[in-house]
């Protein structure tokens, strides 16, 4: 399944940080905030946001697999073998 992430809200915090609320596939159960400090470079900020979006997509995929009775995907290997 292709996961579509979008920023649905953002906040500028009073301590030189910004937070973005991401949602995957229009499913509110996937809502997740990502907060970064503005002292990072634009490249670093983008990398943090991209990593967070990847994590949300993986968690959503695993949630869907679990509901369907399948094994979750290992975030490090991409393997779906269940390890007990």
Image (tube, helix red, strand yellow):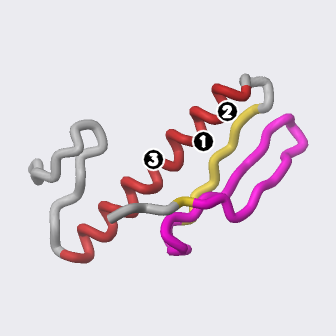
Judging from the image, what secondary structure is the residue with disc 2 in?
helix
Q: Residue furthest front?
A: 2
> Mark on residue 54?
3
What is the spatial separation of the Cα atoms under label 1 and label 3, in whole angstroms?
9 Å
Quarter of the image for the N terminus: give it. Answer: bottom left
Q: Quadrant of residue 65?
A: bottom left
Q: Could you tell whether 62 is left or right of 10 in the image?
A: left
Name above or below for residue 20 compared with residue 37: below
The image shows residue 13, relative to residue 1, as above or below, that is: above
- Left or right: residue 40 versus residue 65 is right
- Judging by the rendered image, the residue that carries numbered circle 1 is 49
- The answer to if 21 sits in the magenta stretch is yes
The Cα atoms of the two marked residues, 3 and 2, are separated by 14 Å
Going 24% across and 69% down the picture, which residue do you hit? 66
**What secondary structure characterizes most of the magenta part?**
strand
Q: Which mark is drawn over residue 45? A: 2
Residue range in magenta is 6-30
- Residue at 17% in and 46% down: 79
Tag 1 secondary structure: helix
Q: Relative to 55, is 84 on the left or the right?
A: left
Mark nearer the N terminus (3 vs 2): 2
Dot 3 surroundings within 10 Å: few (below 14), some, or many (20 or more)? Answer: some
Q: Is residue 79 above or below residue 62?
A: above
Where, by quadrant of the figure, is residue 44 drawn? Answer: top right
Residue 38 at what x, y percent from top left? Answer: 79, 31
Asked whether 13 falls inside the magenta stretch, the response is: yes
């Amino acid at each position: 399944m292709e996961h579509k992430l979008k920023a649905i809200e953002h906040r500028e915090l009073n301590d030189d940080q910004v937070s973005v609320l991401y949602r995957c596939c229009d499913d509110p159960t996937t809502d997740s905030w990502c907060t970064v400090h503005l002292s990072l470079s634009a490249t670093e900020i983008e990398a943090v946001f991209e990593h967070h979006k990847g994590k949300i997509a993986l968690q959503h995929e695993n949630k869907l697999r679990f509901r369907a009775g399948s094994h979750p995907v290992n975030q490090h290997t991409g393997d779906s073998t269940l390890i007990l």
